[in-house]
């Protein structure tokens, strides 16, 4: 069983290590390596923003095992997640994704979390399905899937809007 707390300013180095993990970069929309200067600036903005929820998960031995970020923007709620390299393959991802999204949606029950996942990222698609996301495969060039969880996750107009937003039509 995992526990979480919200990230704090002194978690900046841990997040830097995780951000430049090769699989994390490979599966991100922007696959470039991140510099320490850019990371510190990014982290300080996020960790102090009340619209950004940075869930940091720990296992029974109190080791940090991964993170989920859920961010409320103007009319969009974005999510991203990673499991620390040494803790992958232990089925932590679904528990993390379910725990964080359920916590977030209990605070904002009218919100819908939306993201895109590369269709090659099988682990991510599985954890999304198992955590209650609506996973929609699209015919886009990058073969991206749209994933939604929350109030409007099955609303056709909402789905079309975000297919357009992510260039998936
Ligand atoms: C995606 C990620 C969070 C999944 O965590 P994980 O520890 O690797 O995966 P888990 O052990 O929790 O397994 C989740 C499911 O995917 C399956 N799975 C894991 N790796 C897989 C692989 N390479 N191929 C196929 N299935 C895989 C598992 O069997 C499990 O399915 P099951 O419950 O039906 O058995 C992790 O790989 C990661 O941090 N990747 C880099 C960042 C990323 O891609 N984030 C998501 C996009 S924002």
Image (cartoon, rainbow, N blue to C red):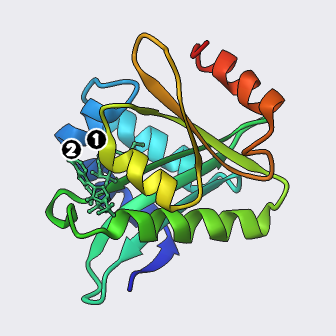
- Using the image as rendered, state which of residue 9 and residue 128 is in the foreground: 128
| Location of residue 78 with respect to 13 vertically, above or below | above
Q: Specify whether tag 2 is near ligand 1 (CB below 8 Å).
A: yes
The spot of residue 74 in percent (x, y) is 78, 35
Residue at 54% across / 71% down in the picture?
Answer: 99
Q: Quadrant of residue 104?
A: bottom right
Query: Label 1, label 2: how many angstroms apart (C-alpha)?
Result: 5 Å
Horizontal and vertical percent for residue 52? Answer: 63, 52
Q: Which quarter of the picture shows residue 77? A: top right
The reply to whether dot 1 and dot 2 touch (C-beta < 8 Å) is: yes
- Residue 117 is at least partly visible in this image: yes
- The dot on residue 24 is 1
| Residue 34 in sight from this viewpoint | no
Query: Does dot 1 land on a helix, a strand or a loop?
Result: helix
Mark 2: secondary structure: loop
Q: Is residue 68 left or right of residue 168?
A: left
Q: Residue at x 41, y 45 (%)?
A: 125
User: Is the distance from the Cβ of mark 1 to the nearest ligand 1 atom less than 8 Å?
Assistant: yes
């Amino acid at each position: 069983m995992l526990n979480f707390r919200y990230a704090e300013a002194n978690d900046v180095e841990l997040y830097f290590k995780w951000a430049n993990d090769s699989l994390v970069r490979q599966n991100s929309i922007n696959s470039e390596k991140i510099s320490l200067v850019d990371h510190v600036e990014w982290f300080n903005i996020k960790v102090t923003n009340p619209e950004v929820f940075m869930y940091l998960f720990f296992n029974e031995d109190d080791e940090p095992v991964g993170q989920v970020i859920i961010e409320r923007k103007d009319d969009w709620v974005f999510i991203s997640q990673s499991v620390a390299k040494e803790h992958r393959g232990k089925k932590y991802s679904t528990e993390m994704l379910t725990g964080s999204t359920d916590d977030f949606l209990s605070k904002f029950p009218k919100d819908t979390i939306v993201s895109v996942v590369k269709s090659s990222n099988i682990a991510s698609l599985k954890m999304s399905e198992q955590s209650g996301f609506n996973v929609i495969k699209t015919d886009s060039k990058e073969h991206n899937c749209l994933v939604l969880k929350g109030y409007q996750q099955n609303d056709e107009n909402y789905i079309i809007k975000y297919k357009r937003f992510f260039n998936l039509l």
